Image (cartoon, helix red, strand yellow):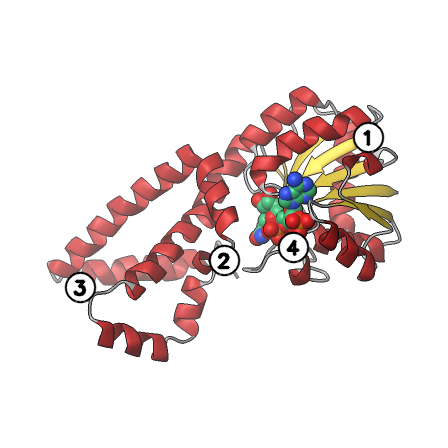
Amino acid sequence: MKIGIVGLGLIGGSLAHDLKQKKHYLIGVSRQKITCQKALDKAIVDQADIDLEILQEAELIFICTPISLIIPILKTTISHLNPKTIITDVGSVKTPIVNSASKLWANFVGSHPMAGTAEQGIDAIQPNLFDNAPCVITPLKTTPQSAIKIVSDIWQSLGCNLITSTPEIHDRAVAWISHLPVMISANLINSCSQFEDLSVVELAQKIASSGFRDTSRVGGGNVELGLMMAKYNKEYLLSCLRHYQENLDNLIKEIEQENWQNLTDLLTQAQGDRQSFVN
Ligand code: NAP
């Protein structure tokens, strides 16, 4: 299949790599010429350019740019395409993208592979990034079944565990398990590093180990991605943050009042519930 990828960064470049391994013909478009050249040097694409016009012959296109550019790029790209071309994206927020994109292009299917690292750009690409990762697709009632099948099949061919959802439920769920953790984690790092007693901060920095590495990983990653999560999933993220704040106030109260049994119950509940999110 002739597959186009716009945005040859961590996700787009990793996708190009894995699809190339499956013997597809890859056409890459990126913002910078140097990124296109690196993609050619790494042999993850057959053709690459900064001009969207080269996507003319693509049968399937993945838009893998920052969220704010997905719709503007779609608008420019479709003027070059045959209406049969299927377009998907990988944006971490789905409702605003799917609502706009499906009005512009009938054969649009929203996707979100739940895979990534704290790095960004073409130098950070990872082979097999999507293997065994959940991938959510968010078709609408009007989305053609043929387009849903092609997008589903291609993700599954990379080893993804496919899940279908509405864009709204997707956005509410990722607000809890992805966007809220980024904000909490960033706030944790900043709270620690801005503590007023420098001798404490300096020692904390020396002894921080696996626990801090785990809890700070998502907050110390791609700034633009975190900003886009907040901008494009604002209402659902705010709702999670407010809920979290209530629970935090409750936690503070339990410790202040030395309600150790309540704190034990709370920690026991968290210990058990964690298994239903990660195993
Ligand atoms: P990234 O590594 O920063 O890659 C984004 C790429 O987009 C850059 O390499 C950049 O190319 C390219 N780009 C920027 N403006 C462009 C333009 N006008 N035209 C063409 N290409 C352009 O970011 P990422 O982590 O791959 O994220 C990309 C998308 O994946 C986002 O929508 C994000 O929500 C989604 N996503 C991310 C993760 C994650 O954990 N990282 C997980 C799932 C989904 P140049 O190098 O040429 O400047």
State the residue in front, 126 or 27.
27
**Label 3: how many residues lie within 10 Å, few (<14), some (14-19) or many (20+)?**
few
Q: Earlier in the sequence, mark 3 or mark 2?
A: 2
Q: Which residue is mark 2?
A: 221
Query: Residue 218: percent from the left, percent from the top?
Result: 47, 58
Query: Residue 266: percent from the left, percent from the top?
Result: 28, 57
Q: Is residue 249 above or below residue 118?
A: above
Mark 1 to mark 2: distance in Å? Answer: 34 Å
Q: Which residue is mark 4?
A: 10
The answer to whether mark 3 is within 8 Å of ligand 1 is no
The answer to whether mark 4 is within 8 Å of ligand 1 is yes
Q: Which residue is mark 3?
A: 260
Mark 3 to mark 2: distance in Å? Answer: 35 Å
Q: Residue furthest left?
A: 257
State the residue in front, 101 or 140.
101
Q: Earlier in the sequence, mark 2 or mark 4?
A: 4
Front tag of 3 and 4: 4
| Left or right of 188 on screen, residue 110 | right
| Left or right of 274 on screen, residue 24 | right
Q: Secondary structure at mark 4?
A: helix
Q: Secondary structure at mark 2?
A: loop
Q: Image point 63% across, 35% down: which residue?
A: 70
Q: Are marks 3 and 4 in contact (CB under 8 Å)?
A: no
| Left or right of 24 on screen, residue 29 | left
